[in-house]
Amino acid sequence: MLNKGTKLYSVLHSKCPHCHEGDFFVDPNPYNFMKAGDLLERCPVCERRYTPEPGFYYGGMYVSYAMGVALFVSIYVAILVLYPEASMWTYIVAVVGGLMVLAPILYKYSKIIWANLFFSYKGVALTAKEIAEQAARAAR
Ligand SMILES: [Zn+2]
């Protein structure tokens, strides 16, 4: 399940969703706030573009929202189970604190998950379809 060629591999290793070889982010550390979530323009290995159209990664907000809700529910249930007598403030501080601390990670993974929803693994070499597309473009 975690082998190269699976989308999970690309997400967990922050690798190019096309070839699973090149890096996806400028800096894979989500807590480097100067470069957090910045993508390379192209894969350094297979040279395929990461952004098919401007604004493509705005859709990552849906992924980020879904992960935020999942995190909220996880923290809430964890407190409910582990500290049944916790006050309402404990819930608020834990949920808000957890979301703030983990926000850079959610932001980073929202982008690579979004990319993996649209791009599939093709390997490093161009596929027959891509070669045909390039030839068609060159002929125009
Ligand atoms: Zn690549």
Image (cartoon, helix red, strand yellow):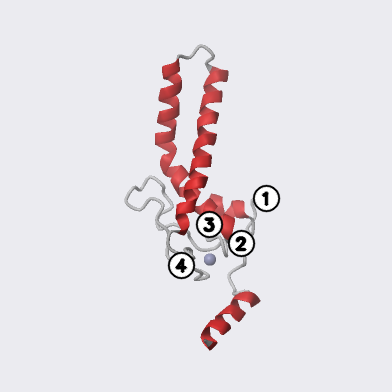
State which mark lies toward you, 1 or 4.
4
Q: Which residue is mark 2?
A: 120
Q: CA distance from mark 2 to mark 4?
A: 15 Å
Q: Secondary structure at mark 4?
A: loop
Q: Looking at this view, name the residue that lies furthest to the left.
A: 34
What residue do we see at 51% from left, 69% from top? 48
Q: Which residue is mark 4?
A: 42
Q: Which residue is mark 3?
A: 115
What residue do we see at 47% from left, 68% from top? 44
State which mark lies toward you, 4 or 3.
3
Q: CA distance from mark 1 to mark 2?
A: 15 Å
Amino acid at dot 3: Ala
Q: Earlier in the sequence, mark 1 or mark 2?
A: 1
How many other residues sit within 10 Å of disc 2, few (<14), some (14-19) or many (≥20)? some
Q: Earlier in the sequence, mark 2 or mark 4?
A: 4
- As rendered, which of 8 and 68 lies closer to the eye? 68
* Image mark for residue 1: 1
How many other residues sit within 10 Å of disc 3, few (<14), some (14-19) or many (≥20)? many
Amino acid at dot 4: Arg
Residue 16 shows up from this direction: yes
